[in-house]
Amino acid sequence: MIKSDHHGGWIIFISFIVALMLTAMPLPDWATNWRPAWVAMVLVYWCMALPDRIGIGIGWSMGLLLDVLQGTLLGQNALGLAVLAYFIIQSHQRIRMFPLIQQAFLISLLVLFYLFLTLWVRGIMGIPPQLWTYWMPAFTSMLLWPWLFIILRDIRRRYHVS
């Protein structure tokens, strides 16, 4: 039997819980469309940092929790986050080498792709497309990525999450 020396699973769990809480946090009407894709960004970070521990299954599970939290079609966010996790795991070594600014632009593109997948599912269900503000989380996620990356990296190092 091979003993794995994984540490800090509770840190990963808490980071996803905080991301879900930030997603559920009430905002003023003018700011609701600008809410960053917190769960997607945390998933991207952990898939980049620990691709052998965090993967498509975690992305799917977090997407289902997000669907329940937001009251959307069950599987809508799950599909988007699972595909997002797949893309990150496939290219995590390359993405790690990018400077934070380039990572932020990549996060913007990935969140746009995630939003497109959820919009596609909504379109299949017959829900009409939303306004242009539907795409704003990609912009705010791009702006917040460097800070989120640094915070999660420091937490991972402090608590020796491996």
Image (cartoon, helix red, strand yellow):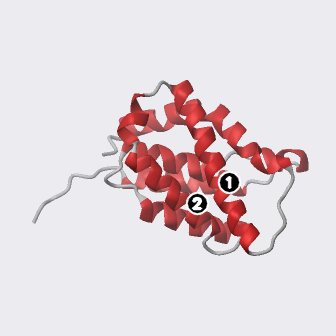
Q: Nearer the viewer, residue 162 or 79?
A: 79
Where is residue 104, by image quadrant?
Answer: top right
SS class of the residue under badge 1?
A: helix
SS class of the residue under badge 2?
A: helix
Q: Earlier in the sequence, mark 1 or mark 2?
A: 2
Q: Residue at x 35, y 47 (%)?
A: 50
Can residue 158 be seen at all in this image of the molecule? no
Instruction: Look at label 2 and name its amino acid.
Output: Gly
Residue position marked by numbered label 1 in the rendering: 115
Q: Quadrant of the N terminus?
A: bottom left
Dots 1, 2 in contact, CB < 8 A: yes
- Percent x, y of residue 55: 40, 57
Residue position marked by numbered label 2 in the rendering: 80
Crowd rating for badge 1 (residues with CA inside 10 Å; few <14, some 14–19, many 20+): many
Residue 50 located left or right of residue 17: left
Where is residue 102, by image quadrant?
Answer: top right
Can residue 25 be seen at all in this image of the molecule? yes
- Percent x, y of residue 41: 56, 46
Residue 145, disc? none
Q: Residue at x 71, y 58 (%)?
A: 24
Where is residue 74, by image quadrant?
Answer: bottom right
Instruction: Look at label 1 and name its amino acid.
Output: Leu
Crowd rating for badge 2 (residues with CA inside 10 Å; few <14, some 14–19, many 20+): many
Residue 6 located left or right of residue 137: left
Q: Residue at x 60, y 32 (%)?
A: 105
Q: Residue at x 80, y 74 (%)?
A: 126
- Percent x, y of residue 108: 63, 39
Give the residue at the far right of this rendering: 29
Q: Nearer the viewer, residue 159 or 131?
A: 131
- Percent x, y of residue 94: 39, 35
